[in-house]
Image: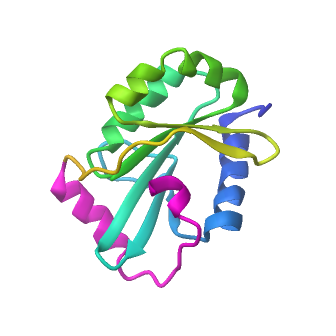
Amino acid sequence: MFDTELDMSKQFEKYLKLNFGNTFIKEYQGLFGVPDFLFYIKHESGISIISFELKLKNWKRAAKQAFRYKNFSNISYVVLPENTLQNALANIELFEKYNIGLAKFDINGDFEIVFKPTPNLPYSEELNKRVVNSVASSRKKTKNAEIFIS
């Protein structure tokens, strides 16, 4: 079990780098909320944005934050440790209703998607463009991203 959210965040950052490359921004500022990680995927039709909100305990707060991130993201996930995941799973219908992803992440770096949302257009074209413009010139390559969006 993680001692702090900072510990969880550091471990999750290592997981992203190892498995998907460096195509993410940690705690992206200046939007409607600050996602813990903002992941981007470049493809022929454009750039997809995936937000991650990590929480040790308060899954309800995480879900509210993740919903807000749908203003600029195509997909938004709540990431919880095993012990908190059970409470969220008891309310999985909320994640399904609001199309918010739910995933488990543990101290060993094991990641599992429990509910995969359907990609959508962000609610705010303006906020999405702000994010897309900030990563558009990056030459970083994403690998294995289909786990999040297939």
Q: From the image, which quarter does the N terminus lie in?
A: top right
Query: Colour scheme used in the picture?
Result: rainbow
Residue under the point 32% across and 37% down: 68
Q: Residue furthest front?
A: 150
Q: Nearer the viewer, residue 46 or 147?
A: 147
Q: Position of residue 82 (x, y in %)?
A: 71, 28
Q: Is residue 126 above or below residue 86?
A: below
Q: Position of residue 52 (x, y in %)?
A: 50, 46
Residue under the point 41% across and 21% down: 93
Q: Position of residue 2 (x, y in %)?
A: 77, 34
Q: Position of residue 100 (x, y in %)?
A: 40, 36
Q: Determine if the magenta segment contains residue 140.
A: yes
Q: Is residue 108 above or below residue 86?
A: below
Q: Is residue 120 left or right of residue 65?
A: left
Q: Determine if the magenta segment contains residue 5.
A: no
Residue under the point 53% across and 73% down: 142
Magenta part of the chain: 124-150
How many numbered badges does the structure rendering display?
0
Q: Nearer the viewer, residue 8 or 46?
A: 46
Q: Is residue 139 above or below residue 107?
A: below
Q: Is residue 124 left or right of residue 34?
A: left
